[in-house]
Amino acid sequence: MGKRSHERINVIMASSFSFGNSYYSYCLGTIMNISEGGMRLESCKCLPCNSEANILIYGNGEDIQVPIKVSRIIKDNGFYDAMGITIMNPSPEYLELVKSIKTTS
């Protein structure tokens, strides 16, 4: 596995994603680190590797929808409870969020 193209910053941020069309397919998650190109998302459910979805990042007064692709599933303490995420076509709002996190950390 190669080096990341962007340095990850440790954060704790609320997010959510859905993986289907029913009410039960909605899931909450916590972003544990973030960069311009990816993040680690911990959740009670993980999407399959290489699947694509949109996640919603809850910000200070402004929520940001981000298109993602699951790069890997992370097993911790015997459970798959985190995903390595690649950001697909990061929006200016997402890049501004990461920039603001970098300047305050």
Image (spheres, rainbow, N blue to C red):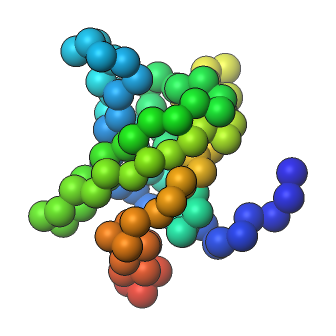
Residue 77, above or below 87: above
Residue 1, x across and y down, in percent: 86, 51
* Residue occupying the far left of the picture: 61
Q: Is residue 76 visible?
A: no
Residue displayed at 60% across by 24% down? 48
Residue 98, above or below 69: below
Residue displayed at 62% across by 44% down? 84
In this rendering, position of residue 19 left or right of residue 38: left
Residue 92, above or below 54: below
Name the image quarter holding the C terminus.
Answer: bottom left
Q: Is residue 86 visible?
A: yes
Q: Nearer the viewer, residue 14 or 17?
A: 17
Residue displayed at 67% across by 41% down? 71
Residue 47, x across and y down, in percent: 53, 26
* Residue occupying the far front of the picture: 89
Residue displayed at 58% across by 46% down? 85
Residue 60, x across and y down, in percent: 18, 66
Residue 19, x across and y down, in percent: 40, 23
In this rendering, position of residue 41 left or right of residue 25: right
